[in-house]
Amino acid sequence: MAESSQTDQPDNHSTHETPAHDRLGYVPTDIEPRWQQYWVDNGTYEVNNDDPRPRYYVLCMYPYPSGPAHQGHVRNYTFGDLLTRYRTMQGDAVLSPIGFDSFGLPAENAAIKSGIHPRVFTDERIEELSSSLKRIGASYDWRRMVTSHDPEYIRWTQWIFLKFYEAGLVYRGNSPVNWCPGCQTVLANEQVNADGTCDRSGDIVERRDMEQWFYKITDYAQELLDDIEGLEWPNKVKTMQQNWIGRSEGAEFGLPVADANGKPRTDIEPVRVFTTRPDTSFGMTFAVMAPEHSMVDAVTTPENKDAVAAFQADVAGKSEIDRLSNDGEITKRGVFTGTHLVNPFTGKTVPLYLADYVLTTYGTGAIMAVPGQDQRDWDFAEAHGLEIIRTIEPPADFEGKAYTGDGPSVNSEWLDGLEITDAKKKAIAWLEEQQLGEQKVNYRLRDWLLSRQRFWGCPIPMVYCDNCGVQPVAETSLPVLAPDEVEFTPTGQSPLLNSDEFLVTECPTCEGPARRETDTMDTFVDSSWYFLRFADPTNTDAAFDMNAVGDWLPVDQYIGGVEHAILHLMYARFFTKALADLGIAPKDLREPFKRLFTQGMVKLGGTKMSKSKGNVIAPEAIIDSQGSDTLRLAHMQVKPPAEDVDWEDFGLDGCHRFLNRVWRLARTETDQLPKVRTGAATKADNEIEAATHRFIDKVTSDYERWSYNTAVAAFMEFTNLLYKYVQSEDGPHDHTTAFAVDSLLLTMAPAVPHITAELWTHRHDGAHIHQQQWPVADPDKLKSETVTMIVQVNGKLRDKIEVSVDISEQDAEALALASEPVIRQLAGGTPKKTIVRAPKIVNIVS
């Protein structure tokens, strides 16, 4: 055998010109389609709900079907596929379903441009993506496929909506939207250009209040917060969810509107404010109200109405992100209402302003401003010539403006000298004693606005009757489906608004004429329960069977991008809890996903790959040339799975060469290996056997902790060792070699399923590797009998010597001093000192 034993580490910058096969017959384009069809035909990864094996649920976030797979898909689904195959070999019944998040704006935009109905467009994209996923070797139970736009899935999504409505978890309320006056329609945020114009008409987009549907997720705010700590999720994701929920403990109290003499008016309600620092209230020198606050008209004086109206119009064109940023001149971010309020802590009046950085969606929509302890309040106070009073004493060396740290209260009368905890308690107690306010907990989390003024989404099953008002559609009338015969106009306006076939209906209560709701649901609704449907996807009598869900859920391992760390995961958690409380899901199912893994992003030249940027590297050409196993291995070896990776660092050619080496090793061991020995094992054979057990132990550990890049390194290192062994002068032992090569194939099988399946069936009379048990290392063979001892002279490496693990310090020293490189380095001199740390290192000081 002329094969070199040097390591074939993956190199960079693969081309697609590498031959698809080598002289010994490794032809991925022949092997891979055959095995992919075999797995489908034989239901290799299909699992039934009555399977007696231990259950394990692996789920990759179901994708939006935008077309063929990209490298992000390959990375995500390779990791999920590896885990599915690994757990199956571990003896588990693994539920590995696939589905498609098939509603969404891109299909509707395509319909506007091409006239192709979104359903047709979506079905074509699903077919393309399904084909791509099969080509990368992804193992799924395709019988369980779920798509959001399937009428049966729509039916149960609407049914869940009605159950939430009955339970008081759905309501209608006003919320601002992006409105294009030219198109006469609502725009998604991504349809608004950076300059605030519509991406279709170019008109200035307005912010309008519209009555829309909400899920009352805030009812679960505290439980969503409390249960985070018990999840085996990345800490960064847990922190993001905690921050999004945003629990704040403080006080809510009223600021009376002052009359001309500075006394509280009784003809108007006080302005309610929430603060997390009531202990700083003595430093309140002004108050700020959101421009949309319901009391704006009541508190604006006649001489200030024009300025206030102009300010409100200006703010209406800003997004919440812009409003909460620190950009822009602070003088332009607020306007005086002409009214003063009374600070109940001091009895003094403070001016009331409107400011864009205060929102009605958090707290009460109004705040007390303490510029001494808040930098934005300080900047606002300076810009408007307002008084600044410190209420927390800063350190002696503090040189900044607003001091936001802790310290004793000052300028606060009966709070002076108290630290923050005691000062807050005393301030809240005083408010409650005076019946001015109360202790309060607020959350940043808002109720879930689910209305979308779109066509391609799940219709909201509600109707409007002139006699009965808003009425839910009868369950027997579900699903409510959008019609096929509709016209998509360039304005982007939903065709449902002009479809009598859809609009005109009958009131389910009085049977009189009624009009259907034309809003559709946020697509996050569909992805908030699909993982439950996978447990029982063909059920026509219920959304899912309670027992099936109880058997499979929670998902043991959920895999997806960190970009879904907040909304999707939060909504799925809310749905799971609510469904359990309503008796639809098992009562003890409080969380949908036990473990979460977020894979890194694939970039090109440091920039995220995207179709819009034209920098996508499609997997098809690579698969056609070098095979999907090569591509999968490259994704595994480039970096740890959680880290972002750059395509320029992928080593496709090196991975392909390595697979060719494995092919030659495994096929030659069967057919052509010279000098195969039988009989008693030698020391070299025993060392290979021990090394094989250590290899199994390492790869198993690497798989368990998602260290796939180090597992690939172990594949390559062990393959090099086997090449040295089979090329040794004494030749390889038949049983030792068979055990070692079989162990290599078994541990590689989850990572590169096609080549290992092909090699195994040749080596084992047609047997299927993916139905084999995972190899288990013998604990007694894991202890190495020898170790490499490092020999240094004056701290520099001079030799490496294989020694017994239990070598004495005297013997280690003697071996080191007898080393030829050491003798040459000492040049006849006597060492000043010898430091021995047997069996690892000997350092000789000359």
Image (spheres, rainbow, N blue to C red):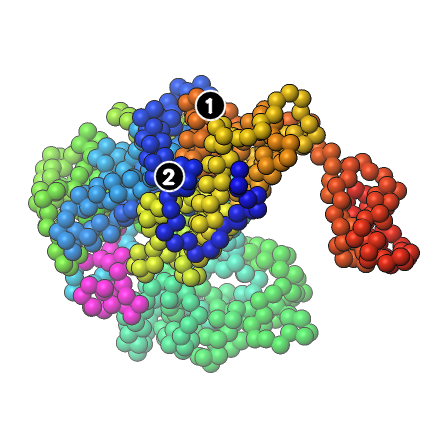
Q: Nearer the viewer, residue 200 or 571?
A: 200
* Residue for point 83% across, 44% down: 815
**Residue 184 within the segment the image draws in magenta:** no
Left or right side of 473 for 654: right
Residue 20 in picture, x, y percent from top left: 37, 44
Q: Please give the residue where the numbered disc 1 appears in the rendered image.
A: 764
**Residue 207 within the segment the image draws in magenta:** yes
Asked whether residue 572 is in view, the answer is: no
Disc 1 from disc 2: Cα separation: 20 Å
Q: Please give the residue where the numbered disc 2 appears in the rendered image.
A: 28
Residue 259 in picture, x, y percent from top left: 40, 71
Look at label 2 and name its amino acid. Pro
Q: Nearer the viewer, residue 828 or 471?
A: 828
* Residue for point 56% across, 34% down: 700
Residue 129 in picture, x, y percent from top left: 29, 43
Image quarter (top left, top right, bottom left or bottom right) of the C terminus: bottom right
Residue 56 in picture, x, y percent from top left: 46, 29
Left or right side of 487 for 657: right
Look at label 1 and name its amino acid. His
Helix, strand or loop at label 1? It is: loop
Left or right side of 506 for 689: right
Helix, strand or loop at label 2? It is: helix
Whether 404 is drawn above or below 479: the answer is below
Q: Nearer the viewer, residue 655 or 296?
A: 655
Residue 156 falls in image quadrant: top left
* Residue for point 60% across, 55% down: 425
Asked whether residue 403 is in view, the answer is: yes
Q: Which residues are magenta?
A: 185-213
Left or right side of 87 for 212: left
Whether 650 is drawn above or below 596: the answer is below
